Image (cartoon, rainbow, N blue to C red):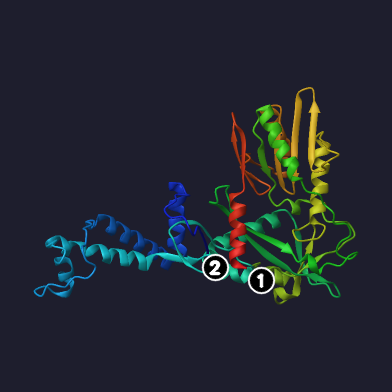
Amino acid sequence: MVVVTTQHIENVETLDSKQNVQLQAQLKREDLELWRSIEEREEAKQQKEKAPKKKKKQVKSKKKKKKAHGTDGVGEDAESDQGSEGAGEQLAPTAASAARAARMQTRHMGAKHVPVQVVHAVVTPDPRNYRDAMRDARANKWKEAIKVEFEALESNNTWEVVARPRNSKLLHTKWVFKTKTHADGTVERYKDRLVVCGNEQEYGIDYIVTFSAVLDLTTGKLISVMAHVWEVPARHGDVPSAYVKADKEEGLEIYLYIPDGMEIPDELLALLGVKHKGQLALRLIKSLYGLKQAGRLWNRLLHKILVKLGFCQCYTDSCLYYKRDAGGVTLVGVYVDDLVVTGTSNVRVDAFFEDMAVLELKDLGVVSKFLGIGFEYDKDKGWLLEQRQVILGMLDKATTE
């Protein structure tokens, strides 16, 4: 877990109340020791605020003799003629020392310790592989996501389980774990993706052509500008399991090792005449993430469908499509499996999502995050673009390297 902090600024509120509650819950769940330290610090701070403040009094001489009739602790207060008030003021130094002990510290470039009292974000790194995921505190979340991914792939007829062919090359697979977040950094969902180790592919055997374009950042901003001009907020669409919707190239046979976490029923083992799943393989029928040509195959399928719906491809950016007719104009920006759509009317945008049901396109509403940029729409002021989460990710990477 990485805690991103500000070193030289104290008591600055950077989170709203909802985000603060979420951060506190995450801290308490994932780092109990740090959470207790923060609680102790806050309690000590409150005690210090409640304790009576010590009155300032002019001292004529720096050195004073202690009164003989007092003890060491009481005498120091007695010599200031404060009587019973001095005994009460002893609570303040105690609270202050507790606060100092509980206070978090860090180092800046000058190698000096600086008190830190503001936690901006807590970033828990995603697991690097299947083994790490099963050991992770969120293992149950990852298991659920793996189950969902397997169900999606199998329902799409992505592969067939076969007895491992002799003299055939098999490709390994791996799981990629990603915590999907909203524009404000809160968790949206846990996503697992099964990918092929494309580095094991050989040209002419496992793949041929691989090129696939992506939307230019300037084009994405242009779409948001036109959305403001037309007063039709751009909407975000997502195609689930996009790559596996495309067929693989004809004439290429691609086999995979059985992925981690995939269970093979005994009935299927008996049917295929094998004793264990190590003697099995997956024969690909559709494309799959990780293949060198996967992006191209998906882009080719999407292009074919958009052209069929009457869209034209822009000459300056092949990932921008437009449709012009007597009723107006519709713009579609494509970044892999994410689509951002606007037009001269909401009716046209609604019609587009209905037509794209053939690819099970999800309507995510007014775009709030696209191309790594947070979007916030205001009818009068237009779009506010920010990259707070990208900056936090860069800080996370810088502190862990």
- The residue lying toward the viewer, choosing from 300 and 75, is 75
Which mark is first along the chain, 2 or 1? 2
Question: Residue at position x 86%, y 39% from top?
Answer: 315
Q: Residue furthest front?
A: 60
Asked if residue 197 lies left or right of residue 385, the reply is right
Tell me which amino acid carries mark 1: Asp
Q: Would you identify the image quadrant in which residue 229 lies? A: top right
Q: Is residue 354 visible?
A: no
Gap between marks 1 and 2, in whole Å? 29 Å
Q: Which residue is mark 1?
A: 266
Residue beneath the point at 62% across and 58% down: 394
**Quadrant in which residue 96 is drawn:** bottom left
What residue is rendered at 71% in x and 71% in y?
269
Residue named by callout 2: 136
The C terminus is located in which quarter? bottom right
Foreground mark, 1 or 2? 2
Numbered disc 1: secondary structure: helix
The foreground one among 214 and 158 is: 214
